[in-house]
């Protein structure tokens, strides 16, 4: 008898399934989130092979793929949120030659009946592929659509999740609406923390895209961001707007922010306004 693969040994340990020396074809189901993906593997007969949780990073995507391949050749993956949280994983699997299908997230009535569970949702995604009930191939997450997704994620996130949208390399730059420009990830992250401490009881109220440009290697966007918050020592929340320029580049299959500049100049001003008294 052949030696049991690492994946099959893991299954025997957590599921009590014996005799799985390798599946003829593996079908993956993935429940996606901002920071973590939960994957479940089935064989072509619908038998559970194992479950894995990985971070939403290039290293996490590769770990998921290698784990699945321990069970046998991966035929297809059913993924929730292919145009949002699952976009990076979709690109990684496609680059490895794996077919990807988009599956529908559980409806609210199902959540009330069964209770939300990431492994259950991942298994439902895999079984939707086996049953031919997937929605079809996802649209490409490259270029403008994926960049807009990153912007929307940043607009609705707290400081730590926003930092995960940035490149952590030494050449990143940040020019905040107050304070000096910073260079290098450590300084940029510290500046973001300082800036966030000046805003409380805030909410984003919208943004207006003025210009955007996307190539396979680089993207930039110019927009007006609108929000309401207590700023500094203010006693009441007040509306404000920022003119923001952001530059992105692809890293590990995902668009990452490499530069952000924000200032309060959102309307035409006289030239003399640049003079500091």
Image: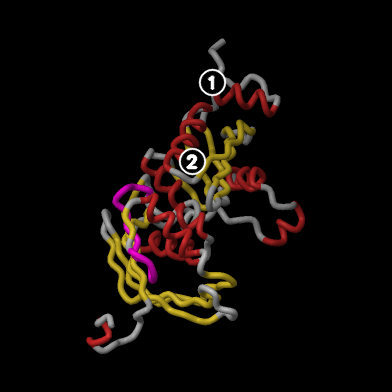
Residue 251: percent from the left, percent from the top? 35, 48
> From the viewer's perspective, is residue 277 above or below residue 145?
below
Q: Nearer the viewer, residue 2 or 129?
A: 2
Q: Earlier in the sequence, mark 2 or mark 1?
A: 1
Dot 2: element: strand
Q: Is residue 183 left or right of residue 76?
A: left
What residue did someone put label 1 on? Answer: 5
> From the viewer's perspective, is residue 127 above or below residue 246?
above
Residue 17: percent from the left, percent from the top? 68, 25
Q: Which residues are magenta?
A: 168-180
Q: Is residue 178 magenta?
A: yes
What residue did someone put label 2 on? Answer: 76
Residue sticking out furthest to the left: 271
Quarter assignment of residue 52? top right
Residue drawn where x is 75% and y is 52% of the image: 114
Residue drawn where x is 50% and y is 54% of the image: 85
Q: Quadrant of the N terminus?
A: top right
Q: Is residue 144 magenta?
A: no
The majority secondary structure of the magenta stretch comes to loop
Q: CA distance from mark 2 to mark 1?
A: 20 Å
Residue sticking out furthest to the bottom: 270
């Amino acid at each position: 008898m052949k030696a049991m693969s690492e994946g099959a040994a893991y299954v025997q340990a957590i599921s009590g399934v014996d005799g799985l020396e390798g599946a003829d074809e593996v079908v993956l189901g993935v429940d996606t989130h901002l920071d973590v993906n939960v994957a479940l593997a089935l064989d072509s007969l619908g038998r559970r092979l194992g479950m894995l949780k990985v971070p939403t990073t290039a290293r996490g995507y590769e770990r998921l793929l290698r784990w699945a391949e321990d069970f046998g050749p991966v035929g297809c993956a059913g993924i929730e949120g292919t145009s949002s949280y699952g976009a990076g994983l979709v690109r990684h699997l496609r680059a490895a030659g794996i077919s990807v299908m988009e599956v529908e997230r559980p409806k609210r009535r199902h959540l009330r009946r069964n209770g939300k569970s990431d492994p259950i949702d991942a298994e439902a995604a895999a079984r939707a592929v086996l049953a031919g009930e997937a929605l079809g191939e996802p649209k490409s997450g490259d270029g403008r659509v994926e960049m807009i997704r990153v912007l929307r994620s940043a607009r609705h996130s707290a400081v730590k999740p926003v930092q995960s949208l940035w490149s952590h390399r030494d050449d990143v730059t940040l020019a905040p609406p107050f304070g000096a420009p910073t260079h290098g990830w450590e300084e940029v992250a510290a500046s973001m923390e300082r800036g966030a401490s000046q805003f409380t009881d805030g909410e984003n109220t919208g943004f207006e895209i003025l210009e955007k440009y996307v190539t396979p290697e680089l993207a930039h966007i110019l927009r007006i961001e609108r929000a309401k918050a207590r700023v500094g020592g203010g006693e009441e929340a007040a509306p404000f707007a920022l003119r923001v320029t952001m530059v992105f580049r692809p890293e590990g299959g995902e668009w990452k922010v490499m530069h952000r500049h924000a200032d309060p100049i959102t309307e035409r001003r006289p030239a003399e306004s640049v003079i500091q008294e």
